Amino acid sequence: MSSKPEPRVHPDHEHVEGIARRRKELGDDSPRIGLFLFECQDAELLRQTLERVPDAAIDWIEEIVVVLADPEADVQLEPVEQRGGREVPVRIHRPPRASGYGATRREAFEYALRRGFDHAVVMRGDGLHPPERLPDLLYPALLEGHPLVVLSRITGLSPVHRTAAAFQGRLLGTRLHDYLSGFRLYSADLLRCVPFQLDAEERGFDVEILIQCRALGISAHEARVPELWREPDPPGGALAHALRACWMAVEYRLHQLHVTRDGRYMVDPGTHYTFKQSPSGSHVQIVEAIQPGSEVLDLGCSQGLLTRPLRAKGVRVTGVDICPPERWAEEMDAYFERDLEMPLELPVARKFDYVIVADVIEHVRERAQLLRSVRRYLKEDGRMLISTPNIALWFYRLSLLAGRFEYGPRGVLDYTHVHLYTKASFRREVERAGFRVLRERVTSLPFEVVFRSTGRSRFIRAITATYHAAARLWPQMFAYQNILEAEITTLDDEATSDRGLTRSRKPS
C-alpha cells in the first residue's frame, strides 16, 4: 500500500508568473534543466509527486530522472510525463549496487553533466519535499542568476538543527538557516568546479557541497517557504549529524589555514585573480616601486590587475598575455596577445622604464628565454620587477616532514606551476639571465585571502604586519613570495621587428 502524500501547498504566484514569462521570452534558448528525484521506493507515491509539479515548472524541465538507491527496487513509470501538450522523458536510473545518500547524488550530478544540462534540480520523490514549490526554487536561478538555490523551511527546525546552523554560519560566514535541506538547484558550471566525487556517502554530502561553494566564493541563495515538511533524521540521529556538520566547518577552516590539506575543499574558482590590497603583498609593493610617469611592460598581465593602480600614477602600461584582448585590455595603452613559452616578438623598441614579470616565471617552462627577452625591451637604465612564490616557506617544510605535498588550484603549489624556487635559486635564475639584483623584497602570507577579508580589518592588518616583519628578518623561512628588482648587465641588441607577430591590439 502506498504512503499518504503530503497535503498540497501553493507556490508563490509571482514566481509562477515570473518563470512562465521568462520561458516565453527565451523560447528555444531556454536553459536545459534536469529534475532528479530520490527516495522513490513507492511508484504510486512517485506518480502523485509528479502530478503535483506545477505546469510552469514542467515547462522548463527537459528530463525527469528517478535515481534509485536499490537496483532491485520495483519502480516502474510511464516513459514520458504528459503535460499541456508537452512530453517530458522520464528515466529510471538503477545503480550497479545499493547506494547511499551521497552516492545517489553523485550519480545524478555526473548524469547531469554528461547530458549537458545547465541546471540540476534535486528533491525527494516521496512527497516530503513539496513539488508545488519548484517555481520558488527556479525563480532565483532563472531570473536572478543564482548558481545554487536551497529551499528551506521557515518553521519546523529542531533546536539541534538551529544551533548547528548558527555555529556553521558563524564559523563559515554564511547565513543559511537550514543546512539539512536537500531540496536544491545547482548550476552545471558550479558542479564542474567542485570535487563532489570526494564528498560523503551520508547526509553530510549536502553540507560538504555548501562548504565547497563557500570555498569558491559562491553564496547559496536560500528560498524560505512556510510549509512544514519533515526531513528524516540521518542514520545515527539528528544530534550526531549536527555534530558531524559542525566538525566539517571546522575541517574547512583548518584546511583554509593550511593546518591540514583536504582534497574536498581544493576547488577551482577559475582564472580571475584579484588585486591584493595588503601593503606587504606583491601587488602593492610592485606598484609602489614604479615611478610616476614611467613606461611599463607587464608580461603575463592576466586580467590587467596592476593596470588601474599604475594608471592612477600616470604610468603608461603595455600588456602581454596569451588571452585574447577583453574589456580590461582597453584600459591599457597597448595589448599584445602572445604565448610567453615562445620567443617574444613585439613591434616596440627598447622603450620601457620597467618590465613587470609578476608571478609568471613559475608557470613558464622556457623561463631563461623569457628573461633574456626582457633585455630587448628594457631601457639600459631600466628595471625588471619580478616575483615568485617561496617553496621553502615554513609551512611546506613542515608538510614534507609530515609526508604531505599537495598541489591545489591556488597558492605556492598551484596546479599550473612547472618550476618552484627558493630565495637563492630564484636570485640565481635572474642573475644567470644577464641581470644584477639591486633590491630584494618579501611578502607576508596572504591573510586577506585566507580569511576572505577585504584587507581593511584591523586584526588582519595587525597579523599581516607582524608576519611581514618576521619575513624580512628570515626571508628563507617566512617569505611567502620573493620580489627582485634588477638591472641589465648584458644588453641584447637583437633587432625587434614585426616578423613572426601574432594578433595585437592597441585600444583607441
Image: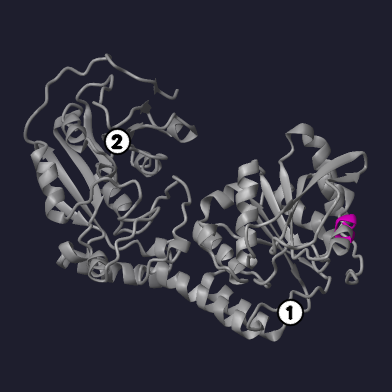
Q: Position of residue 400 (x, y in %)?
A: 24, 66
- Mark drawn on residue 299: 2
Q: Nearer the viewer, residue 281 or 219?
A: 219
- Mark drawn on residue 157: 1
Q: Give yes or no for contact between labels 2 and 1 (Cβ–Cβ under 8 Å).
A: no
- Give neighbour class at mark 2: few <14, some 14-19, many 20+ (Cα, 10 Å): many
| Quarter of image, res 280 | bottom left
Let me know if residue 194 appears in the view: yes
- Mark drawn on residue 79: none
Element under label 2? strand
Q: Looking at this view, name the residue that lies furthest to the front.
A: 72
Residue at the location (61% across, 46% down)? 113
Q: Quadrant of the N terminus?
A: bottom right
Element under label 1? loop
Type of residue at label 1?
Leu
Report the label total: 2
The mark that comes first in sequence, 2 or 1, is 1
Q: Nearer the viewer, residue 15 or 292?
A: 15
Please give the range of residues in magenta: 48-52
Let me know if residue 18 appears in the view: no
Q: Quadrant of the C terminus?
A: top left
Q: Position of residue 115 (x, y in %)?
A: 65, 42
The CA distance from mark 2 to mark 1 is 54 Å
Type of residue at label 2?
Leu
Q: Does residue 56 lie above or below 320 as drawn?
A: below
Q: Is residue 49 magenta?
A: yes
